[in-house]
Image (spheres, rainbow, N blue to C red):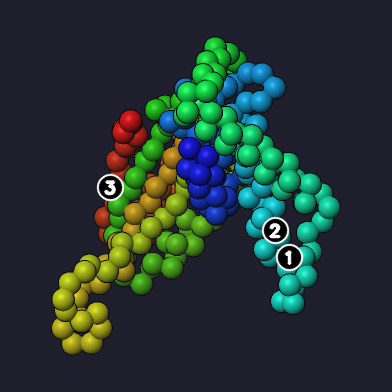
């Protein structure tokens, strides 16, 4: 459980998400009902924050080492890492005790604050497939990068805002030269995920006109579809 949550948080950090965005994405999804708590002195968000701080400190430490191996971590970073590691060890012990039946899993009644985070089932997830006009691929990528920067500056409730390029179709033929496989270099997939409908609607007020004008001017075809997470437990 801890390894899974840690891996999710590490992925979001790699995507450039802030602590608030990661907490909104609920990396402990699937474990909250048994191990989580939204009240008391140690909440699920506290655990997520501790793991986040530990991973960020590790990344800083990795980038802060001289080639000769000198550790450049500050005392504050070391203290943060030690605190997060201690919290993780405590939770691991609790999980092991529950699994062995030595203690019962905590069942804490969840409070319903006015600004409670949206359930993952309420997330708004949009996927778009498009074929960009020949020679305009870099213009399109630059436009998406500019929009993502504005999302990070102005919008709330964003979880994912990513662009993917369709990979070259596999096949036995050569990838270059005479007889090469057809290229998918102009085909892209865009994905955005929002905490709730209100966040998605607020984003759409400024992004919608850009999609209807600049996106369409740069693409030969474009199709949006809204999807929903399917629980697999």
24 relative to 123 in the view: left or right: right
Left or right of 200 on screen, residue 80:
right
Res. 158 in view:
no
Q: Is residue 54 left or right of residue 111?
A: right
The residue depicted at 31 percent of the width and 33 percent of the height is 232
Q: What residue did someone put label 2 on?
A: 60
Point 54% across, 44% down: residue: 6
Give SS at disc 3.
Answer: strand
Label 1: how many Cα within 10 Å (few below 14, some 14–19, many 20+)? some
Contact, mark 3 vs mark 1 (Cβ under 8 Å): no
- Camera-near label (3 vs 1) is 1
Q: Residues within 10 Å of mark 2 (few under 14, many from 20)?
A: some
Q: Between 222 and 179, which is closer to the camera in this rendering?
A: 179
Of the image marks 3 and 1, the number of the one nearer the N terminus:
1
What residue appears at the point 51 percent right and 44 percent down from the top-left corner? Answer: 3
Q: Quadrant of the C terminus?
A: top left
Residue with the mark numbered 1: 64
Asked if labels 2 and 3 touch by Cβ distance under 8 angstroms, the answer is no
Q: Which of marks 3 and 2 is in front?
A: 2
Toward the viewer: 100 or 64?
Answer: 100
Q: Name the residue under label 3.
A: 223
Secondary structure beneath dot 1 equals loop
CB-based contact (under 8 Å), mark 2 and mark 1: yes
Distance between the Cα atoms at labels 3 and 2?
40 Å
Q: Position of residue 93 (x, y in %)?
A: 58, 34
């Amino acid at each position: 459980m801890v390894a899974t949550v840690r891996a999710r948080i590490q992925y979001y950090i790699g995507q450039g998400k802030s602590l608030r965005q990661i907490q909104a994405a609920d990396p402990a999804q699937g474990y909250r009902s048994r191990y989580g708590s939204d009240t008391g002195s140690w909440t699920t968000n506290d655990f997520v924050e501790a793991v986040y701080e530990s991973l960020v400190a590790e990344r800083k430490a990795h980038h802060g080492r001289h080639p000769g191996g000198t550790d450049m971590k500050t005392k504050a970073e070391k203290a943060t890492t030690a605190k997060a590691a201690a919290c993780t060890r405590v939770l691991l012990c609790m999980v092991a005790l529950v699994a062995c039946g030595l203690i019962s899993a905590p069942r804490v009644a969840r409070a319903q604050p006015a600004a409670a985070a949206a359930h993952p089932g309420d997330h708004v997830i949009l996927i778009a497939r498009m074929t960009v006009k020949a020679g305009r691929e870099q213009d399109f990528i630059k436009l998406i990068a500019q929009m993502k920067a504005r999302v990070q500056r102005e919008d709330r409730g964003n979880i994912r805002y990513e662009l993917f390029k369709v990979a070259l179709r596999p096949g036995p033929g050569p990838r270059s030269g005479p007889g090469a496989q057809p290229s998918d270099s102009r085909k892209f997939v865009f994905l955005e995920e929002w905490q709730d409908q209100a966040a998605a609607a607020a984003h759409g007020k400024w992004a919608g006109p850009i999609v209807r004008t600049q996106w369409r001017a740069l693409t030969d075809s474009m199709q949006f579809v809204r999807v929903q997470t399917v629980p697999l437990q």
